[in-house]
């Protein structure tokens, strides 16, 4: 039994390695650009998100919220989101409302407390699934183009594109620095409670120390990046309308986009009808 | 002596540097599961020391904006955890906290001041976040006061989380790493971006006057954010009364759909325009 437990925990720690995290993040960013959601126009998706990201907060009807939730659940499945992101979503929803239920029981609440909390849970879940669909299902470049079309600051869309490009490199570099610190140091024994605490403190210390070289390296890299950008006239182009127009001319609304909106609307209308009969 | 006037491209460098480093760190905190010992949550949540260090060494505003953008892009948009309105508040609180800390330090060689600034910045950010959290739950749950045990539980959990975060994460993950990294990086990292190190005579404000104004503006922003949340709360209760009759909800749905269709038509027209002109 203890052997099995040991194996199980080893397995979990295997899964949580740096490479696993990196793969999941990269898969989430680049792995699914052939899905139905990824092919839609980013502007349409952002308008769609505006509805499902805002309206659920303003309703307390369980049928309406349930309808919204079902729809965004279907779109999330269509977007083929990475498993880790869904896991984080579940943990997030529980930590926002599940523990609140436990604590309110402790303060003398009863089973009736569960209904407002169910409403709250449905709201949170709908809004986060809608954002997972849009922000994880879309290609970063298309997403930043869509945001730019709506007049978001150029800085933000630059940050999104840059973040997706630089992240794999940064993660690899961080891992290398971390490993080199581990090679040079000697980790304390992790036996017993005090040993475990010592081990934890050691790990945190290594992480903090490794940010020292990482900061210096990243400073050099960001200087190179900015100088390269300046050479191509980035700051001038960012404020120039002509450049923006050229950049955004690739965006086109097709029948698929309209169909997507129409189907979403149809579903919500059915929900509204059901609601008025209940 | 020359004032520490960073050029535009140097400000962009600081922005890119803070964004990528803090973004990477928040990505990890989002991915690594938290573990709890009883009620005390031990998480590696707080990597705020990274923007704090950089704000003390470089232009505070660029570093603060970079940190907030990095968190938004890396850990929210990339993982699809974008939460809409809540993210705006997080963006503002992180910016203010880091900016205050960066503005307080006139001479990075002065360790006492660095420590006070790190702690003040963290405390300001956490306090604003706690207020917003409490208001958010009040705003999402209908008849908040009527549910037995819920108000007390929210105040208890949020208050406890604030103290826990400040004493545990604030002290261990903000104060100590900042005290360790600032003197180590001081004078080494600035030349990499082509800048002079900050000294007493080249620091941004002449006396404390500007700093006080900055704090007041920060305070006003916090109040404004609070007020916004509160007015949202009133809007909801008004909305709830109005939506007593179920028929009006269906009407609202139709209205929303009509707005969506109008937006769609405008979108199509605009897209057509750009195609004609380009």
Image (spheres, coloured by chain):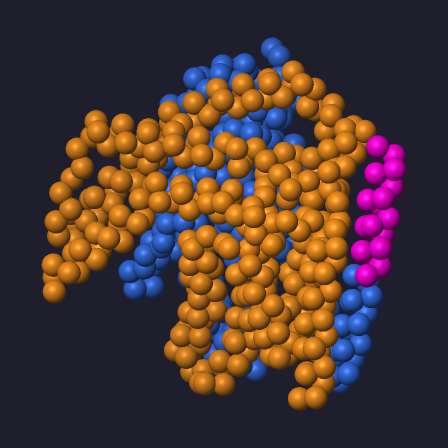
Chain colours: A orange, B blue
Count of numbered tags: 0
Residue B197 visible, this orientation = no
| Residue B277 highlighted magenta (yes or no) | yes
Residue A72 visible, this orientation = yes
| Residue A82 highlighted magenta (yes or no) | no
**Residue A252 x/y as whole percent:** 75, 45
* Overall secondary structure of the magenta section: helix
* A95 and A161: which is toward the camera: A161
Q: Residue at x 31, y 32 (%)?
A: A178
**Residue A102 x/y as whole percent:** 40, 74
Position above or below: A79 against A235:
below
Q: Which region is colored magenta?
A: B261-278
Q: Quadrant of residue A126?
A: bottom right
Q: Residue at x 41, y 79 (%)?
A: A105
Q: Residue at x 56, y 22 (%)?
A: A225
Classify residue A191 as left or right of residue A164. Answer: left
Classify residue A154 as left or right of residue B101. Answer: right
Position above or below: A208 against A79:
above
**Residue B203 x/y as whole percent:** 57, 22
Quadrant occupied by the C terminus of chain A = bottom right
Q: Residue at x 60, y 49 (%)?
A: A38
Quadrant occupied by the N terminus of chain A = bottom left
**Residue A254 x/y as whole percent:** 74, 51
Position above or below: B80 against A92:
above
* A138 and B92: which is toward the camera: A138
* B277 and B1: which is toward the camera: B277
Specify the farthest residue to the top: B1
Specify the farthest residue to the bottom: A278
* B1 and A117: which is toward the camera: A117
């Amino acid at each position: 039994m203890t052997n099995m437990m040991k194996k199980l925990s080893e397995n979990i720690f295997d899964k949580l390695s740096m490479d696993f995290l990196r793969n999941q993040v990269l898969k989430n960013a680049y792995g699914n650009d052939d899905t139905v959601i990824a092919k839609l126009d980013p502007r349409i998706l952002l308008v769609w998100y505006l509805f499902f990201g805002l309206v659920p907060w303003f309703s307390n009807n369980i049928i309406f919220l349930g309808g919204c939730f079902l729809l965004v659940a279907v779109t999330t499945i269509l977007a083929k989101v990475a498993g880790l992101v869904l896991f984080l979503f579940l943990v997030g929803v529980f930590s926002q409302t599940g523990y609140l239920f436990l604590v309110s029981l402790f303060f003398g609440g009863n089973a009736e407390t569960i209904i407002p909390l169910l409403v709250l849970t449905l709201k949170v879940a709908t809004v986060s699934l809608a954002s997972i669909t849009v922000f994880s299902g879309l290609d970063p470049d298309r997403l930043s183009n869509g945001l730019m079309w709506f007049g978001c600051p150029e800085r933000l869309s630059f940050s999104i594109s840059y973040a997706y490009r630089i992240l794999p490199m940064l993660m690899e570099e961080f891992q290398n620095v971390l490993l080199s610190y581990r090679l040079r140091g000697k980790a304390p024994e992790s036996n017993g409670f005090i040993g475990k605490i010592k081990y934890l403190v050691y790990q945190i210390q290594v992480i903090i120390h490794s940010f020292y070289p990482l900061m210096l390296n990243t400073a050099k890299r960001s200087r190179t990046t900015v100088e390269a950008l300046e050479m191509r006239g980035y700051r001038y182009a960012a404020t120039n309308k002509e450049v923006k127009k050229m950049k955004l001319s690739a965006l086109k609304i097709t029948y698929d986009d309209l169909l997507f909106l129409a189907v979403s609307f149809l579903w919500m209308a059915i929900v509204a009808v059901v609601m008025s009969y209940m | 002596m020359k004032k520490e006037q960073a050029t535009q491209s140097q400000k962009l460098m600081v922005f890119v540097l803070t964004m990528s480093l803090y973004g990477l760190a928040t990505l990890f905190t989002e991915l690594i599961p938290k573990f709890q010992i009883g009620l005390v949550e031990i998480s590696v949540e707080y990597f705020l020391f990274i923007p704090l260090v950089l704000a003390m060494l470089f232009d505070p505003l660029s570093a603060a904006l970079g940190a907030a953008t990095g968190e938004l892009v890396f850990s929210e948009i990339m993982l699809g955890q974008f939460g809409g309105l809540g993210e705006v508040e997080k963006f503002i609180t992180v910016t203010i906290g880091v900016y205050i800390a960066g503005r307080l330090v006139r001479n990075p060689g002065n360790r006492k001041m660095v420590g006070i600034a790190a702690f003040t910045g963290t405390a300001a950010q956490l306090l604003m976040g706690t207020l917003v959290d409490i208001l958010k739950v009040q705003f999402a749950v209908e008849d908040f006061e009527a549910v037995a045990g819920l108000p007390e539980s929210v105040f208890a959990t949020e208050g406890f989380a604030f103290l826990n975060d400040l004493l545990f994460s604030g002290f261990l993950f903000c104060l100590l790493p900042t005290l360790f990294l600032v003197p180590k990086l001081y004078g080494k990292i600035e030349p990499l971006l082509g800048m002079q190190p900050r000294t007493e005579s080249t620091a941004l404000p002449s006396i404390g006057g500007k700093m006080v104004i900055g704090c007041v503006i920060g305070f006003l922003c916090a109040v404004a954010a609070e007020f916004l949340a509160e007015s949202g709360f009133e809007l909801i209760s008004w909305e709830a009364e109005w939506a007593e009759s179920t028929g009006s909800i269906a009407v609202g749905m139709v209205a929303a759909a009509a707005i969506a269709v109008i937006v769609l038509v405008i979108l199509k027209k605009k897209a057509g325009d750009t195609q004609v002109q380009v």
